[in-house]
Image (cartoon, grey):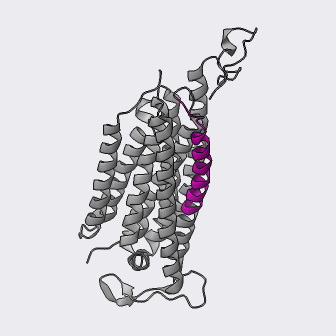
Amino acid sequence: MAEHISSVKLYVGIWLALMVFTVLTVFAATLDLGVFNPIVALAIATTKAVLVVLFFMHVKYAHEKLTKLVIVTAIFFFLILLSLTMADYGTRLWT
Amino acid sequence: MHTSPPATVEGEAHQNPALLHHFATEEQQKNAASLGMWIFLITEIMFFGGMFCAYLVYRFWYFGDFAAGSSSLNLTLGTVNTIVLIGSSLTVAMAVRCAQVGKQKAIVVYLLLTLILGLAFLGIKAKEYKDKFDEHHIPGEAAFHLEGHVPRHPDIPVNQQHAQIYFSLYFAMTGMHALHMIIGVGLFMFLTYKAHKGVYRPGYYTPLENSGLFWHFVDIVWIYLFPLLYLIDRHP
């Protein structure tokens, strides 16, 4: 068969990692990290999202480069949305 | 279970009943379906992206009031819901795997587990919403009132207008997420019925796989919503 079949072990391992990161993000929120609080929270969330996309959604094993291109394009345009919006709203109080 | 296809005179390309005539191979057909699903998911990224962008702007402007609103949420229920949803992603991934290896009975078991976890998530979410109604944390409500002050600034009371913006975004984002969950539960009920009839097998499980992609996407949206809504400035 052409498609990749992941092992049960791998799926359970990814699930365990996601659980650990969930506990970690709740714990990190109780620490005073200053400006790093939201950065740590988003870094953990992004790590979790990448694990889900690569392994649960099988993107790591996708033969089609087109699928990966579509995903990267979506993220790129989403970041344009955020960065250009904040270039306006984030700088309005500057004098 | 499956009757063999009638012999055709058109040639070998038509021997497989699961292969539509405009695709050259089964793999090409699967890739096309998968790519179509991903294109749909990127429109979903843009749909939720607009709300995340609005959230970012107002969180930046009214950080203290957002933190006060965030602290009024039930962190325990939020964490439990995150665990429940990630568990349901595992059961979906396992259901797809069972289809790949041809364990048709196990597909049904994993899909039922997914449904139970999905409904548990929605039940807990409903409880959280009810608490918000009881506490008068509903934006636009005449009796809206968020007690307290900005975290670590006992001298700065919560701005009620700004707190309502937080709760508007909270209900819009978790509400749209819950709507996606409800659609997902409907989808998986249908899939469970089909799987019970033995439709999905190693050569054909595209509906299962694509619905799985949808479910994982909804899971990812929650993975971001949870820290952004529940964990703002929680430290003492």
| Direction from residue B105 to residue B18 in the image, left or right | right
Residue at x 40%, y 39% (from the top left corner): A54
User: Which corner quadrant holds the C terminus of chain B?
Assistant: bottom left
Measured as percent of width and height from the top left, residue A21 is found at 30, 55
Does any portion of residue B190 appear in the rendered image? yes
- Percent across and percent down for residue A26 are 30, 65
**Which quadrant of the figure contains the N terminus of chain B?**
top right
In depth, the one of B168 and B5 nearer the eye is B5
The image shows residue B66, relative to residue B81, as above or below, that is below
- Residue at the front extreme? B1
Of the pair B12 and A33, the residue shown nearer to us: B12
Is residue B65 covered in magenta?
A: no
Looking at the image, is B5 positioned above or below residue B164? above
Counting from the top left corner in percent of width and height, residue B47 is at 59, 54
Q: Residue at x 60, y 33 (%)?
A: B33
Main SS type for the magenta part? helix
- Residue stretch in magenta: B177-201
- Closest to the observer: B103 or B85? B103
In the image, residue B145 above or below residue B230? below
At x 42% / y 64%, what residue is drawn?
A: B81
As drawn, is B6 to the left or to the right of A82?
right
Image side of residue B11 versus residue B98, left or right: right
